[in-house]
Image (spheres, rainbow, N blue to C red):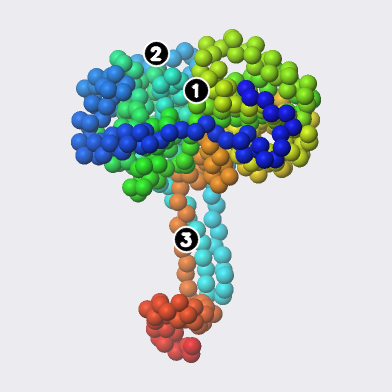
Amino acid sequence: MEIYTYPRREQWSEIIQRPRLDLTRLNETVSAVLADVRQRGDEAVKEYEQKFDHAALSHLAVTEQEMDEAEQLVSNELRDAIILAHHNIKVFHVSQRFVGQKVKTQEGVTCWQKSVAIERVGLYIPGGTAPLFSTVLMLATPAKIAGCKQIVLCTPPNKEGKVNPAILVAARIAGVSNIYKIGGVQAIGAMAYGTETVPQVYKIFGPGNQYVMAAKQHVSLDGVAIDMPAGPSEVCVLADDSANAEFVAADLLSQAEHGVDSQVLFITTSKQKLDEVQSEVARQLELLPRKEIAAQALESSRSVLVSSVDEMMELTNSYAPEHLVIQTRDYERLAERVVNAGSVFLGPYACESAGDYASGTNHTLPTHGYATAYNGVNLDSYCRKITFQHLTEEGIRHIGHAVELMAEAEQLDAHKNAMTVRLRELNIES
């Protein structure tokens, strides 16, 4: 990790810079694959599965028999852990249910909102170097709570054409049965445009590599909604001299192992803690099975020593991390000063992986600085708010003339007339 000691403000923009990606050729590939899937459907999808996932598929849908087989391949202990996580995620997201109320803005004018589930949603579950069965729970659980009528799940198969069994078990626990063996850009295209086998959806959720993220942004220009723009995973850890260096290093590495393009940022007010954490990162890195991946991620990561808590909070809010871990004495006070973050973990025992799996909060979060404007996936992500209004004769009396005046000032005579004919019908003078 690159070390910055008491950096000048002019250096902050360099510190919070994410790894740069050349997307020129990537976007060309993504556009070509999406266009092909849109035109040729299942045939194109199967060809790309052969090319990219090296799987020769006779059918794309996961069968009930495959679901049953998966149950036998997952240990009881892991199944129980998935059930525990699903329970906590469900409890937290049920608490987010919208309760609308009718509001009288004027006498005779009543307005309200109704929350309506998106009818058809698509969930993308990565299955490459790390099959993220936990993401099934994070995406499918709120979709079921919201009442989405059709939930489509796509995830890449292995070379034998099999889906990771834990993904299938998690899907069954979460109540999802429409599962397809499709990965990458072709999965996003299949859900966005529909094929002979895969239903078209209205909104696509889920993380993925650079190609998946580019594909999601591409189809969003074709009228298909996406959960959020996102990129590689990241974490920022804040620490003072009271922090446990072993804990801090473990949290940094937990994100660094996600992928070579991941990034971690460590900010501290203690020189001693900076040194201790550097040593711990080096020690723990050697013990990781995904050591090479984490090591590459650390090359574009930074440790920063700042002179005050104020600087520490300003810098992290400028970075706008996906995950923010605060390991300081006064973590509750500092939590109040967080402005930009996807999800925040407070105190020495709130490791980021707790939120990734089982605390109950959602782990599908904005990355790459998008936390300045986006929140993570929640129950509202699967709903739309439809507004209603009802006007009585008295309501027309109260707002009719104002509507006429405003429409006339905007030179929209038909707008004005829509109110004028009602005023005339009720013999109300303008």
Q: Is mark 1 on a helix, strand or loop?
A: loop
Q: Relative to the observer, which residue lies in front, 116 or 13? A: 13
Residue occupied by mark 1: 260
Q: Where is residue 255 in the image (x, y as percent from the top left)?
A: 57, 24
Amino acid at the residue labelled 1: Val
Position above or below: 111 against 63: below
In this figure, which residue is indicated by the disc labeled 3? 387
Structural distance between the alpha carbons of marks 3 and 1: 45 Å
Foreground tag (3 vs 1): 1
Mark 2 residue element: helix
Taking the image as shown, residue 17 lies to the left or right of residue 327, namely left
- Residue to which mark 2 is pinned: 72
Please name whichever residue, 362 or 311, is drawn nearer the observer in this view of the structure: 311
Identify the mark nearer the N-term, 3 or 1.
1
| Residue 418 in view here | no
What is the spatial separation of the Cα atoms under label 2 and label 1, in whole angstroms?
A: 33 Å
Does label 2 or label 1 sit earlier along the sequence? 2
Pick the residue in front: 235 or 150: 235
Residue 154 lies in quadrant: top left
Image x and y of residue 17, in percent: 57, 35
Q: In front: mark 2 or mark 1?
A: 1
Task: Please tell me which residue is depicted at 60% across the width and 30% down the height of the picture.
Answer: 235
What residue is rendered at 43% in x and 29% in y?
A: 209
Count up the numbered dots: 3
